[in-house]
Image (cartoon, rainbow, N blue to C red):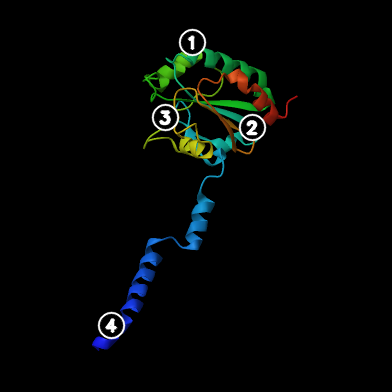
Amino acid sequence: MHFWKLTNWPSLLFLGFAFFFLYTYPTLSSVKKMAAESPKSVHNFTVKDIRGNDVPLSNYNGKVLLIVNVASKCGLTQSNYKELNVLYQKYKDQGLEILAFPCNQFGKQEPGNNEEIQETVCTMFKAEFPIFDKIDVNGKNAAPLYNFLKAEKGGLFVDGIKWNFTKFLINKEGKVVERYAPITSPLKIEKDIKNLLGSS
């Protein structure tokens, strides 16, 4: 009996490890299932508009999107809203949509509630493109859409959003094509937008 214990302990150890890995690590089928369920494009997400209504981003299938985290009291606010308005007026009929997401994570420069933000954006900055619900773009409460955007196009040194008016350009299939720094002028993106729209 003691001889059996001594000679078979490697087998028992192996069986123990086998059961451990079996129950701890996902099976090939579960890995495939998780991969199939993971978002493939921005069209897989639903967000809320400034009034709290659900907006499936699949509504924008076939559109070129420029997704921007905005703030009303930033040094970049005036120039960005002005140039975003220019791009929207020029290309909205060709299939461009600009999706603006207010965020208060950078210098607390978007302190208002949704109603106050909408009033400011529409009256002071004359924005006609859609403004969405105020969100976090970094941290544990970051909006799932922004986690996806950052994973698809990381930033310089770190993937996190560094400041207001970081911009993501999305093609008609919902794929993230490019990421632009906050200091990048919206009008400097015009050529890339035209290429995705198929404009001459």
Q: Identify which amino acid the numbered label 4 is placed on.
A: Leu
Indicate the secondary structure of the residue bearing disc 1: loop
Indicate the secondary structure of the residue bearing disc 4: helix
116 lies left or right of 46: left
Q: Which residue is mark 2?
A: 63
Viewport quadrant of the C terminus: top right
Between marks 1 and 4, how big is the CA–CA gap? Answer: 82 Å
Q: Identify which amino acid the numbered label 3 is placed on.
A: Ile
**Could you say which disc has been placed on residue 39 in the image?**
none
Mark with earlier residue (3, 2): 2
Mark with earlier residue (2, 1): 2
For the question of whether residue 126 can be seen, the reply is no
Rendered image quadrant of residue 191: top right
Whole-percent x, y for residue 28 in the image: 50, 62
- Between 140 and 19, the one lying in front of the other is 19
Q: Which residue is mark 3?
A: 135
Whole-percent x, y for residue 194 in the image: 69, 25
Between marks 1 and 3, how big is the CA–CA gap? Answer: 21 Å
Dot 1: few (<14), some (14–19), or many (≥20) neighbours within 10 Å?
A: few
| Marks 1,4: beta carbons within 8 A | no
Residue at 41% x, 22% y is: 114
User: Considering only vertical position in the picture, is 142 above or below 103?
Assistant: below
User: Considering only vertical position in the picture, is 61 above or below 17?
Assistant: above
Residue at 49% x, 31% y is: 156
Between marks 2 and 1, how big is the CA–CA gap? Answer: 27 Å
Q: Identify which amino acid the numbered label 2 is placed on.
A: Lys
Q: Which residue is mark 1?
A: 124
Q: Which residue is mark 4?
A: 6
Point out the frontmost of discs 1 and 4: 4
Residue at 38% x, 35% y is: 139
